[in-house]
Amino acid sequence: MQSPLSIAIDGPASSGKGTVARMVAHALNLSYVDTGAMYRSVGLRALELGIRTTDGPAVGALAASLNFAFSWDGARLRVAVDGEDLTKAIRTERVGQAASDVAVLVEVRAALLELQRELAKNGAVLDGRDIGTVVLPDADLKVYLDASPEVRASRRRDELAARGDHRPLEAVLRDILARDAQDSGREHAPLCAAADAVRIDSTHRTPQQVVTEILRLAGQIGGVSAPTT
Ligand code: CDP
């Protein structure tokens, strides 16, 4: 029997990783692991508990204590932490920033690393910032998905507006650039493409077009037949 596929999809905020990773996982009958949701959950819990998001030992201990459960409800991935559904609560901009803040801390990264590897054990699509470089350096396929900052900001603005959070494009762009800088500039597991990652630019492509490209690449590596559509 063929060993299960592991696919790493990394890239900056709103490059389309989540949508694409979910669709690829579905097409290949693999599980999808949203590692950003873990960092977001840690960030949210730190804010709720009044733990400073710069306090490595305290936030690291918090991250290690959380029990994550992912489930698929037919439309989206649901994230529960210690039995509480946080799917919606982790999607705010404030929590996104807190996630990026706690993601700088080596204690937090160490606490989440083994869990992420464990979830990938039986084959999975993982998306994040350091999947191809740190979490799964031997992934069967690594993709680095990017898009122009303007297009990413406009996607994020629409996503927030759909949730009732209406923000000017310039403000969203500013936040995205600040988060990119923090994620790329940090010491531990910075956002960057693995040397053997395939780079895909989604600026002028639909999610389906990106998925088709990834399935084609997956078909080349594992004897998996990619759909012809
Ligand atoms: O949704 P968006 O692309 O903005 O971000 P996300 O994937 O939900 O991740 C939120 C934050 O978690 C990022 O800005 C990163 O700082 C951090 N993160 C990380 O450091 N490593 C990962 N593997 C995933 C997320």
Image (cartoon, rainbow, N blue to C red):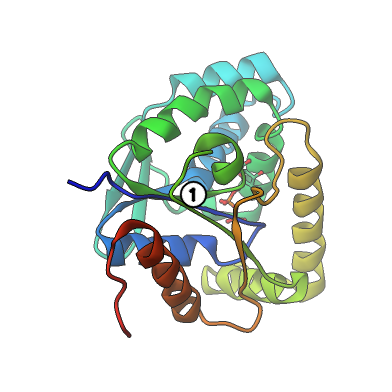
- Residue at the image point whose x is 75% and y is 51% from the top: 179
For the view shown, which residue lies furthest in the left direction?
A: 1
> What's under tag 1, amino acid-wise?
Ala
Task: Report helix, strand or loop for mark 1.
Answer: helix
Regarding residue 209, the answer to whether it shows in the image is yes
Q: Residue at x 70, y 29 (%)?
A: 53
Quadrant where the image shows the C terminus? bottom left
Residue 79 found in image quarter: top left
Q: Which residue is mark 1?
A: 89
Asked which quadrant contains residue 43, the reply is: top right
Residue 76 x, y percent position in the rendering: 34, 61
Q: Is residue 18 above or below residue 212?
A: above
* Residue found at x 49% / y 45%: 37
The foreground one among 195 and 100 is: 195
Density class for disc 1 (Cα within 10 Å; few <14, some 14-19, many ≥20) is few
How far from the left and from the top, in percent, is residue 93? 65, 54
